[in-house]
Image (tube, grey):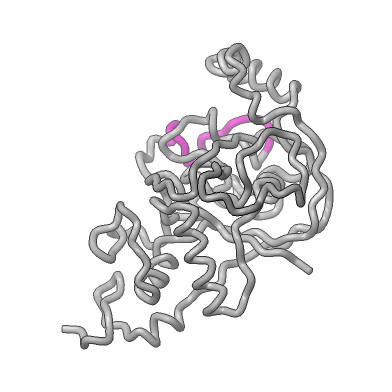
Amino acid sequence: MPSSNSKLNAEGWEVTPSEQAHKAKTPTMFEIAAGTFLMGTSDENIKQLQLKEPDWAYEWSDNNLFAAEQPQHPVTLSAFAIAQFPVTNAEYHTFIWDSGHRIPRSWVGYTFPNNAEEHPVAGISKNDAEAYIRWLNQKTGMTFRLPTEAEWERAARGDDGRIYPWGNTFDPWRCNTAESIKKGTTPVGTYSPSGDSIYGAADMVGNIWEWTQSLFLPYPYRPNANREESKPNGRYVVRGGAWYYTRKLARCSVREGVLPDHVSPLIGFRLARSIE
């Protein structure tokens, strides 16, 4: 039996609080230099999708479902860094044990599902993600944060306006969507390197939706225009699609708006930080 001031980890070993606190893990980050990229979906992108994906792209166009992603426009960003992977169950588990924060709904007790250590944590509200980031920054002395939606999109697609992280043609072997028939999340990096963005970021489409710190507002996106302010009743952008959804939503420019306290088994997050 564990002592009163210790806990069991996912493997059943006794771990003291001081040991738990020591395990706060800083992610592998890729630095992206200041620069300009094409954000959003262009009319040319839609024509490409209609040619290659006629089963749904014409319907989306007819029903104006691309509107939230338009117009495509250039956005200039300062240098930043993006995490290679979303935060995993194992990483979030350490936070739960050390902080006493509420557990994701999909977990049983204080334990994530068996053999899911390296799966992205899901069932996370934006508020939960920000609590994790505050904890990690306090433990590590770093200044991590959620990415803005513009940073997320640039990290996913590069600067040339491509539709998917790898190019303009969907490939079910490069990401975890409904076409993959996995029926759940996969370990981070499962589709690396073939599904990685040109910056090395993995799982940017499929697997889970990811929180950003940006409010869901019409385009064009303008940095430093109060899009990242805190609004308890505001809707915030999630990006990337998820394993449950088809390739329609596994595009770098797809954006949805979600309340910050909303919890979904399909939403997780990855970290970013500014570069001075």
Q: Is residue 115 above or below residue 93?
A: above
- Asked if residue 149 can be seen in this view, the reply is yes
Relative depth, front residue between 72 and 259: 259
Boundaries of the magenta span: 167-180
Residue 122 position in % (x across, y down): 41, 52
Please provide percent x and percent y for residue 144: 61, 67
Q: Residue at x 39, y 51 (%)?
A: 123
Q: Residue at x 28, y 59 (%)?
A: 114
Q: Main secondary structure of the magenta part?
A: loop
Q: Quadrant of residue 108?
A: bottom left
Q: Quadrant of the N terminus?
A: bottom left
Residue 196 x, y percent position in the rendering: 62, 49
Give the quarter of the figure containing the C terminus: bottom right
User: At x 58% / y 47%, what residue is drawn?
Assistant: 204
Going by the image, does 77 lie left or right of 102?
right
Side (left or right) of 192 relative to 100? right
Question: Residue most toward the left?
Answer: 1
Judge whether residue 174 can be spotted in this image: no
**What residue is rendered at 42% in x and 71% in y?**
95
Q: Which of the pair 276/91 is nearer the observer?
A: 276
Residue 177 located within the stretch drawn in magenta: yes
